[in-house]
Image (cartoon, helix red, strand yellow):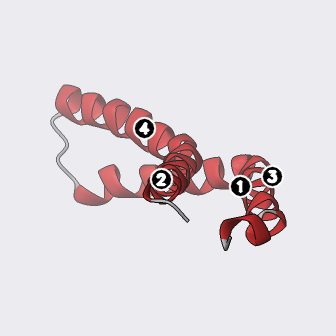
Amino acid sequence: MTPEFVIGFARQSIELALTIALPMLGVGLGVGVIVSVLQAATQIQEMTLAFVPKIVAIFLALLIAFPWIMDKMLTFTRNLLLNFPNYIK
């Protein structure tokens, strides 16, 4: 195992983690901006009004994106396990 391989593998792992988190983070960002604009327009500064819609939206995004996330994770894990003999050389 060369240092280049370890760096490449770590990079691939971090990219996968960020790709998997992207749908939930994007939905949370979008809902957060919309709720913030509504709060600024109506001057309602209730904390639960900002928190609850984001949690619900992120949970729904997770439910919708779950098959895609599992496909990405299974592909990564399958490639890792199939190439494991090549990694320990």
Q: Amino acid at mark 2?
A: Ile
**Closer-to-camera residue (19/78):** 78
Please tell me which residue is depicted at 80% across the width and 52% down the height of the picture.
Answer: 71
Q: Amino acid at mark 4?
A: Val
Quarter of the image that includes the C terminus: bottom right
Q: CA distance from mark 1 to mark 4?
A: 16 Å
- Residue that label 4 marks: 31
Crowd around label 3: few <14 · some 14–19 · many ≥20 (10 Å): few
Disc 3 element: helix
- Residue that label 2 marks: 14
Q: Nearer the viewer, mark 1 or mark 3?
A: 3
Crowd around label 1: few <14 · some 14–19 · many ≥20 (10 Å): few
Q: CA distance from mark 4 to mark 2?
A: 25 Å
Q: Nearer the viewer, mark 1 or mark 2?
A: 2
- Residue that label 3 marks: 71
- Residue that label 1 marks: 63
Q: Amino acid at mark 1?
A: Leu
